[in-house]
């Protein structure tokens, strides 16, 4: 997922903070896996959530809507859709901050 961040979110971490940011990504992805988001495409969508969330300090700082999706155990066929919905929410929030 680090390659994914590097490709699509080149500013995801300054060189000095890369280790700390990657640990935070690992925490988010571990929580997603533990809640049923086990498919690689769902994990990539949660990586997008992380990328769009900018300077996230801890996983619990994500918006309540995203946290609700993270906590809701998906059915196998719904995991990518739910993760994509979380990524869309994060994308819209990032765009609103930039305008």
Image: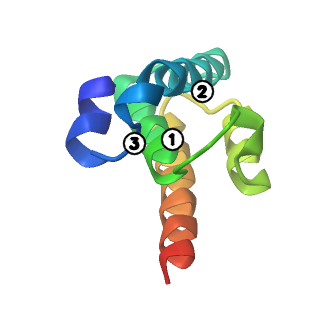
Q: Residues within 10 Å of mark 3 (few under 14, many from 20)?
A: many
Q: CA distance from mark 1 to mark 3?
A: 9 Å
Q: Are marks 2 and 1 in contact (CB under 8 Å)?
A: yes
**Marks 1 and 3 close (CB-CB < 8 Å):** yes
Task: Give the mark nearest the N terminus, 1 or 3.
Answer: 3
**Front residue of 92 and 14:** 14
Q: Could you say which is closer to the camera, residue 73 or residue 98?
A: 98
Side (left or right) of 48 relative to 20: left
Going from N to C along the chain, the mark reached first, 2 or 3, is 3
Q: Using the numbered discs, state the Cα–Cα distance from disc 2 to disc 3 in whole angstroms.
A: 15 Å
Mark number displayed over residue 28: 2
The picture quadrant where one finds residue 18 is: top left
Q: Image check: 45 left or right of 1? A: right
Q: Nearer the viewer, mark 2 or mark 3?
A: 3
Q: Give the residue at x 32% y 25%.
A: 2
User: Is residue 72 visible from the viewing direction of this image?
Assistant: no
Residue furthest toward the left? 7
Residue occupying the point 47% across, 53% down: 52
Q: Secondary structure at mark 3?
A: loop
User: Picture coordinates of residue 68 (x, y %)?
Assistant: 76, 45
**Dot 1: element:** helix
Residue of label 3: 12
**Residue at x-position 57% and y-position 51%:** 86
Tag shown at residue 50: 1
């Amino acid at each position: 997922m680090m390659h994914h961040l590097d490709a699509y979110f080149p500013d995801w971490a300054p060189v000095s903070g890369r280790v700390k940011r990657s640990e935070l990504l690992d925490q988010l992805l571990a929580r997603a896996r533990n809640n049923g988001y086990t498919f690689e495409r769902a994990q990539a969508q949660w990586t997008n959530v992380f990328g769009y969330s900018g300077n996230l300090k801890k996983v619990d700082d994500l918006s309540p809507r995203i946290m609700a999706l993270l906590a809701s155990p998906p059915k196998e066929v719904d995991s990518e859709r739910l993760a994509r919905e979380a990524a869309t929410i994060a994308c819209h929030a990032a765009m609103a901050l930039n305008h």
